[in-house]
Image (cartoon, grey):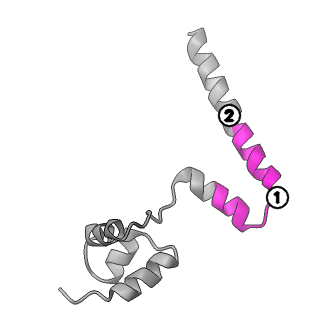
Amino acid sequence: MKEIDWESVKNLYDAGQTDRSIGQRFQCGYRKIYKWRHKNGLPANHIGKKRLVTGVLVGAGAAVAAIAIYKEVKKRSRDKKEKLETNE
């Protein structure tokens, strides 16, 4: 296994790369990057479904109102689902 340049790892982390993508770049397991990140008290760079949509809206320069609409639609969908479950 080749030596890992931790400064380069930090640069990739700062650029938003995930543990898995950094590990692939350095030909090591993502757990090694995960352990380094935890040792340095750094949160994960990952994109969950909710973060992705919100991030895209903000990144595209959409107004804060667009995010509020997205959240309201999600709430209505959840409320509708709960209503259907209670009627059964």
The x, y position of residue 70, in whole percent, is 72, 46
- Front residue (pair 73, 10): 10
Q: Residue drawn 79% across and 61% down?
A: 62
* As drawn, 48 above or below 39: above
Kind of residue at badge 1:
Ala
Q: SS of the residue at dot 2?
A: helix
For residue 57, which quarter of the picture? bottom right
Q: Which numbered marker is on residue 75?
A: 2
Q: Residue furthest top?
A: 88
The Cα atoms of the two marked residues, 2 and 1, are separated by: 19 Å
Range of magenta residues = 54-73
**Residue 29 in magenta stretch:** no
- Front residue (pair 32, 79): 32
For residue 85, which quarter of the picture? top right
Q: Which numbered marker is on residue 17?
A: none
Q: Residue drawn 38% across and 87% down?
A: 7
The x, y position of residue 17, in whole percent, is 46, 74
**Quadrant of the frame with the C terminus:** top right
Q: Residue drawn 58% across and 50% down?
A: 50
* As drawn, 21 above or below 56: below
The x, y position of residue 13, in whole percent, is 45, 76
Kind of residue at badge 2:
Lys
Q: How busy is the neighbourhood of tag 2: few (under 14 within 10 Å), some, or many (20 plus)?
A: few
Secondary structure, magenta segment, majority class: helix
**Quadrant of the frame with the N terminus:** bottom left
- Residue hosting label 1: 63
Q: How busy is the neighbourhood of tag 1: few (under 14 within 10 Å), some, or many (20 plus)?
A: few
Q: Residue drawn 33% across and 77% down?
A: 24
Q: SS of the residue at dot 1?
A: loop
**Residue 67 in magenta stretch:** yes
